[in-house]
Amino acid sequence: MRWKPTQILLLLAIFIVALNLRPAITSIGPMLDIIRVDLTLSNTQVSLLTVIPVICMGVFAMLAPILNKAIGLNKSMYLMLLLLAVATGIRLSVSSFSILLLTALAVGIAIAVIGPLLSALIKQYFPQQVAAVVGIYSFGMGMGATLSTGLTGVFYEKANYHFALAIWAVLAVLGMIAWRVSSKHPMEVKQTAGKSAKKGENPWRSKTAWSFLVFFGLQTALFFSILTWLVPIAVSNGMTLLQAGTLLSSMTVVQIFMNIGFPIALQRFQSRTPALIGILLIGIVSIGFMWTSEPLLFSIGVLLMGIPLGGLFPICLLMPMDATDTAEETNTWTAMMQTGGFIIGGILPLFIAMLYDYTSNHQVTLFVFLLLFVAMLVLAIQIGRTASKA
């Protein structure tokens, strides 16, 4: 596989922009208890700082094709990265919970638009290397999540939680610079209709698209719930905060390797379903290990959890790409999938927080994680049967 210099620059820009799609949310997790105590909040209230952006990523995902048609891809990307930088940077000097919620709203809107635009861009500019580029995209997102979960605590120790949350605005500024360097010629997602009646259908009327939506929602809920609650669960099992944080960072390292390795491996197979079912089964096994209070088994379970967490998102990105013919269709299908999917992915973690406020038992939290895996396994089998008939 040979890349042109312009493609390499664009790949670098995609990677740097992808770095921005998680830190403004995942940096909240390590600071969750600190923010809760400082602002005198309940677990449900403080969880809104991660729930609201995820829900907004769903509610505003359909802005992506609208903005693309209205002002073009380049201006849309610059505008959203600027919004992300400002919203994250404001956290440096604001301690009001209501203002933090507003920044969470802005972060969600920015990420909601960037995601589908990147998917459409990949479909159009890398039609023969979709899986490999999705791997780079997912790797960037995983790296951003890993950096934020691993370094936010370090920045907190050096300064305070305001600085630890706001420092990630730097990545958005770097994203704007990288996009400027790579896009000397204006890029656009072509507005051409698909020739295939099946593939060109309105995704809102497609059972397949709805299956993608629900599956994406369940994996999103699982991802953000685990990143938010893993440290508290580990601490409740007897680990120190440092041990729990180290374990979380170790899991995200496994996740990063899956982010880039899994999409590349998928290129060797005609059907993605067996691999998808395989990593879901690994997830179920990992919950079984985490259910024990034995530190070694719990740690093994957490490390295994990095496999489905790293593999599920890139395969979700590939689903609408596989089901569509053109970049415009990919943009529409991805926006539809993320619209409903992120709403589901935001509501379920809020439910988990409320459940924990009520039960004070993280075994219940793990049981909810198990139910999410089982539901995704059923959906994966259904999606695989639909694809085999296509």
Image (cartoon, helix red, strand yellow):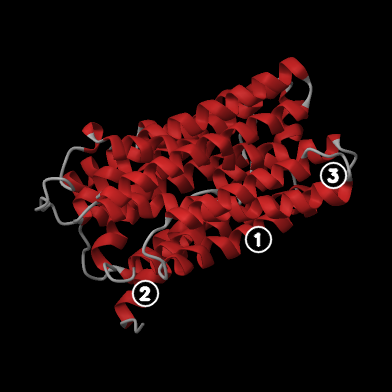
User: Which residue extends farthest bottom?
Assistant: 2
Which tag, 3 or 2, sits closer to the chain's start? 2
> What residue sits 80% from the left and 51% below the top?
299
Between disc 3 and disc 1, the foreground one is 1
Q: In which quarter of the image is residue 2?
A: bottom left
Q: How far apart are marks 3 and 1 (CA)?
A: 20 Å
Distance in Å between CA atoms under marks 2 and 1: 27 Å
**Is 144 displayed left or right of 286 in the figure?**
left
Q: Is residue 171 above or below residue 200?
A: below
The amino acid type of the residue labelled 1 equals Val
Taking 156 as reference, is 2 left or right? Answer: left
Label 1 belongs to which residue? 254
Quarter of the image where the N terminus is located: bottom left
100 in relation to 301, above or below: above
* Residue ID at (74%, 41%): 288
Which residue in the structure is indicated by mark 2?
A: 9
Q: Position of residue 76 (x, y in %)?
A: 29, 49
Residue drawn at point x = 53 percent, y = 67 percent = 261
Residue 313 rendering spot, x and y as whole percentages: 48, 51
- Mark closest to the chain's N terminus, 3 or 1: 3
Q: How crowded is mark 2: few (under 14 residues within 10 Å), some or many (20 or more)?
A: some
Q: How many marks?
A: 3
User: Label 3's element?
Assistant: helix
Q: Do the residues labelled 2 and 1 touch (CB within 8 Å)?
A: no
SS for dot 1: helix
Can see residue 289? yes
CA gap, disc 3 and disc 2: 40 Å
Task: Please name the amino acid that badge 2 sits on.
Answer: Leu
**Kind of residue indicated by mark 3:** Leu
Pick the front one: 387 or 60: 387
| Residue holding disc 3 | 241
